Image (cartoon, rainbow, N blue to C red):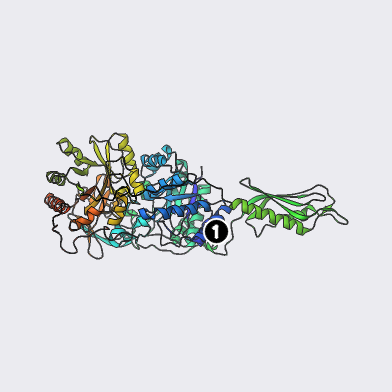
Amino acid sequence: MIPELLAPAGGTEQLMAAVRSGADAVYMGGYNFNARRSAHNFSPDEMQKMLSYCRLYGVKTHIAVNTLIKERELPELLSYVSELNDMGADALIIQDAGAAKMIKSSFPDLPLHASTQMTVTSLEGVKYLEDMGFDRVVLARELSKNETDAICRGAKAEIEVFVHGAICQCYSGQCLMSSIIGGRSGNRGRCAQPCRLAYTLEGKSIKQKSGFLLSPKDLALINDLKELCDMGVSSLKIEGRLKRPEYVSAVTGIYRKYLDNLSPVSREDFEELENAFSRSGFTDGYFKNRLGGEMMSSKNSSGTEKGFSAAARSRASENGAEKKLPVDIALYITENEPAGVVITDRNGNTSFGSGSAGAERAQKKPLEKSRALEQLTKLGETPFYAENAQAVFSDDNLTVPIREINAARREAAEELIKIRTSVRPRRRYTFKLNEIKNSKTKTPSLSASVLTAGQAIAAAKAGIKTIYAPLIIAEALVSEGLDIIADTGAIFKPVKTECKRVLASSNAAVRFYKNQGKDVYGSERLNVFNSLTADMYSELKAITLSPELTVRELSDITRRTSSVTEVIGYGRLTLMIMKNCPVKAAGCCTGKQRGGVFLKDRKNERFPIVCGEGCICGLLNSKPLFAADRAEELIKTGADIIKLVFTVETPEECTEIINIYRAALGGAAAANPFPENAFTRGHLFRGVE
């Protein structure tokens, strides 16, 4: 099976270039709620025209609604999706789980595609989304060939994979770097790409190294198309909604060529891909399990464009040749009847047109069939060309004015355009948004997230009842009698545990451990941005709300959900979760790093790197979030629990912080142990756009 070729459309010219270059589908954003807010995107009028244009040419349209949605935005989102539904969008690409629930309930016939921002890395994650009603899942770019194959074999939903374009250093949907550093959230379509800047790696027992240490090369799987086809992948996606029309044309055209014939890629075509855009070449590292320094850009973090072929420039031009659709066309001439034209396209759509004057018996010379066919097939100004044509005369001695044939042909062509661009009605239902259930504030309890056994023991001695620790540490401490919740990791692996309580950071983990009969808690990596998403996790023991929300936005959720909620009140937030460890990629890994390694930016801020199981590592913020001296604001969030996140702290520092927060939440004045400019308030009072 040849999969769908899905091309980016950051604007009108890019969309038309994609269609002309052979895309089966395009993905695009509207004026709101999409993860490429800096692209041109489309106004309602532009969207209407472009959806009609794509329907005409048989190209599907996937509309990106792939950002996290705040509580107060839900009514606007519902109205926006209603417009897209009426316009005939073929599918929506969704990140926010609560939004997906609302859309599926309101518009059950509108297909939903799970964005790569949902961080799906396993069949378990796909199954969870299938149960939610998703029709397609876009896999994380970090998956290997074998992992992708296993998911395709077990999935009922369609599977979409990225085959070309930029890749992030962090798992998509898990990056807070741009958000925390500059207030521009990738989860809200405003990523400032701090990963493309230069950094210096430094720390104990390693050699200092500088460069673009968080900037991977662009992905190119042009040489792996046959394997992807054999796996049963449903859609191959080209990244690039911020790219020029010439880029879209060049890359789409080359992938179309090799997807159709699955032949070895010529050097000339591969060079054209490089010329279109590259960052020190391409990588297939995740797909081929070739991680390390060879995946990373070494020279120019912003990439280069060297030029485009004449064909690519032509397809991208406003004057470029439009795509033509094959049709069968027939002319029927019957005495005393107007000339009739029937056009049938390859989808079986049939249209009719007729003249106004009846055919007559010829007084001198009858109309020759060759002349009639010549006129019949003049479809130049239409989107069609006659692949097969016939003229049927009831009598060889008939004639009809050529203008009558022209009129019938034009009417039939116009009718076929209407048929192809028409929108089928879909069901819609009223959806009731959550109302405020409670407005009382309460004094929250404390929980602690730790990375070491010493931190866990310190938290327990300080009276914390809810303690999250990495699975291996949790199992060891549970065996010694401590009641610890096992953190099963940022990226799901189906690991069984004897611990009765677990922390899940993905929908896959939620599903897996619920089926194991565990008491499941949800981490901040589930990206809970509104009460609809919070309600989806009502069966969990607790769910941590997103650290990108303000006090007011957190309160908007807690007042409308019955779920037990946690809010992070202290700690170094994890800015990135990475499969390609920058320490290892820089050639500095000893296999024994457990701390003391940092990335330093151009402002001399030092971001700790925390290495986890399987070389999945986290990049921490350079400063901890501290808000004990604003305890009254933490209480106003309405959260049931305030989570204290301990990463690089000593056990003694953990104890000090716990005591400060407990006293502050009890009404005492809070001492701030951090010097000025050595801590942050996170987004509690700032928020993201």
Q: Is residue 180 at least partly visible in the picture?
A: yes
Among the 4 quarters of the image, the one containing residue 598: bottom left
Check the image and report above or below for 453 versus 44.
Answer: above
For the point 25% across and 40% down, which residue is it? 502
For the point 64% across and 54% down, which residue is it? 384
Residue that label 1 marks = 49
Measured from the top left, where is residue 448 in percent x and y?
A: 19, 47
Secondary structure of the residue carrying tag 1 is: helix
Measured from the top left, where is residue 606 in percent x and y?
A: 22, 60
Q: Residue furthest right?
A: 363
Nearer to us in this view, 620 or 518: 518
Nearer to us in this view, 26 or 78: 78
Measured from the top left, where is residue 506 in percent x and y?
A: 32, 44
Judged left or right of residue 602, residue 383 is right
Measured from the top left, where is residue 270 in percent x and y?
A: 46, 56
Among the 4 quarters of the image, the one containing residue 275: bottom left
Three-letter residue code for mark 1: Lys
Nearer to us in this view, 512 or 2: 512
Check the image and report above or below for 1 versus 637.
Answer: above
Name the quarter where the C terminus is drawn: bottom left
The count of marks equals: 1
Q: Is residue 141 at least partly visible in the picture?
A: no
Judged left or right of residue 83, residue 202 is left
